[in-house]
Image (cartoon, rainbow, N blue to C red):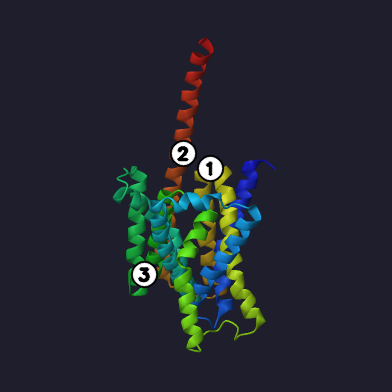
């Protein structure tokens, strides 16, 4: 199978798994969101360490240990991914799956906004239109919910910052996840110990099935990440940009069709504006990518005669 096709399949698999997360977290009740989060950190670390052991891939440890800047960036990333994971688990298990999907729908627009504010990038006109529609959607949904959609905004901004910091750190996905979970291991174990001492822990108290499901959060975290890493190697960024919408679409479907969350007309209007913003954003991104490829081909064609004459 050609690398591109295999990469696309890996990407689709990763986003489908992320999109079906809302079906998994309710299975862990009566565990609370923070307890689930703590177990996810512990078992994710165990899973990633097993993967690294099988690959016998440890050379990177010394390299990172000698770079305090990278460790600091990964510590910041660990903090924001912890917030992201915790809020999403809370959203799913408290009946806010649709609002959680909104966070991942608007995340690309938040990334564009970060580019302007933090990286001093200049937006193209259609990008401004997309960001404007996104802001309008947040206003409409604020009136619909009777409050700021804080779940969606927290997810979008925490994941946006997480991605930005990880890009600056420049550490591969599996290795980065190992360091992030290692950083959060002590707080996670401390919280689980606190629950155990207080007699409030559910782990081991709800049967073997519950234990296996809790341990399974490690695989649930690591497998999509590994698939995504395989996709990112061979799939163009523009294609990844299209594939990323699979996850929030499936999350939205889980909220509306499976969890039967209420969707009044005003909420449909808000989401429709978000989807319009993403359509404009995607069209502009594909057009820009096409222009870049055309310019490179023309440049390569111009350079070819020069090389042949020399």
Residue 31 sits above or below residue 111 on the image: below
The numbered mark, 1 or 3, whose residue comes first in the sequence reads: 3
At x 45%, y 34%, the residue is 292
Q: Secondary structure at mark 3?
A: helix
Residue 224 sits above or below residue 204 on the image: above
Q: Position of residue 24 (x, y in %)?
A: 58, 72
Mark in the foreground, 1 or 2? 1
Residue 25 sits above or below residue 180 on the image: below
Residue 271 visible within the image: no
The circle drawn on residue 254 is none
Count neighbours of disc 3 (C-alpha within 10 A) and say few if under 14, some if 14 to 19, many if 20 or more: some
Viewer-side residue, 33 vs 92: 33
The circle drawn on residue 150 is 3
The numbered mark, 2 or 3, whose residue comes first in the sequence reads: 3
Q: Position of residue 137 (x, y in %)?
A: 36, 62
Q: Position of residue 164 (x, y in %)?
A: 40, 53
The circle drawn on residue 289 is 2
- Residue at the extreme top: 309
Q: Position of residue 303 (x, y in %)?
A: 48, 19
User: Could you tell me how far apart the alpha carbons at marks 1 and 3 are, in whole angstroms?
Assistant: 32 Å
Left or right? Give the position of 9 relative to 73.
Answer: right
- Give the residue at mark 1: 236
User: Could you tell me how far apart the alpha carbons at marks 2 and 3 are, in whole angstroms?
Assistant: 33 Å
Answer yes or no: do the residues labelled 2 and 3 have beta carbons within 8 Å? no
Viewer-side residue, 14 vs 254: 14
At x 48%, y 69%, the residue is 185
Count neighbours of disc 2 (C-alpha within 10 A) and say few if under 14, some if 14 to 19, many if 20 or more: some
Residue 17 sits above or below residue 232 on the image: below
Q: Secondary structure at mark 2?
A: helix
Count neighbours of disc 1 (C-alpha within 10 A) and say few if under 14, some if 14 to 19, many if 20 or more: some
Answer yes or no: do the residues labelled 1 and 2 have beta carbons within 8 Å? yes
At x 31%, y 50%, the residue is 118
């Amino acid at each position: 199978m050609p690398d591109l096709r295999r990469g696309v399949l890996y990407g689709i698999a990763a986003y489908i798994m992320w999109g079906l997360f809302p079906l998994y977290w309710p299975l862990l009740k009566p565990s609370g969101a923070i307890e689930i989060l703590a177990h996810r950190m512990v078992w994710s670390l165990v899973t990633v360490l097993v993967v690294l052991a099988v690959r016998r891939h440890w050379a990177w440890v010394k390299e990172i240990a000698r770079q305090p800047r990278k460790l600091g960036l990964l510590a910041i990333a660990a903090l924001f991914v912890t917030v992201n994971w915790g809020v999403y688990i809370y959203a799913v298990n408290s009946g806010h799956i649709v609002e959680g999907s909104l966070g991942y729908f608007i995340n690309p627009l938040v990334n564009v906004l970060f580019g302007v504010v933090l990286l001093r990038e200049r937006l193209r006109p259609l990008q401004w239109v997309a960001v404007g529609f996104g802001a309008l959607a947040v206003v409409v949904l604020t009136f619909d919910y009777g409050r700021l959609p804080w779940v969606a905004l927290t997810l979008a901004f925490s994941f946006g910052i997480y991605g930005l910091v990880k890009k600056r750190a420049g550490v591969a996905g599996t290795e980065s996840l190992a360091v992030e979970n290692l950083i959060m291991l002590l707080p996670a174990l401390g919280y689980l110990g606190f629950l155990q001492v207080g007699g409030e822990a559910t782990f081991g108290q709800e049967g073997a099935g519950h234990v296996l499901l809790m341990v399974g959060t490690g695989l649930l975290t690591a497998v999509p990440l590994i698939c995504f890493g395989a996709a990112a190697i061979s799939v163009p960024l523009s294609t990844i940009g299209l594939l990323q919408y699979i996850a929030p679409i499936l999350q939205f479907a889980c909220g509306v069709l499976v969890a039967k969350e209420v969707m009044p007309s005003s909420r449909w209007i808000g989401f429709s504006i978000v989807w319009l913003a993403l359509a404009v954003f995607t069209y502009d991104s594909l057009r820009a990518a096409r222009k870049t490829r055309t310019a490179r081909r023309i440049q390569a064609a111009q350079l070819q005669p020069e090389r042949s004459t020399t």
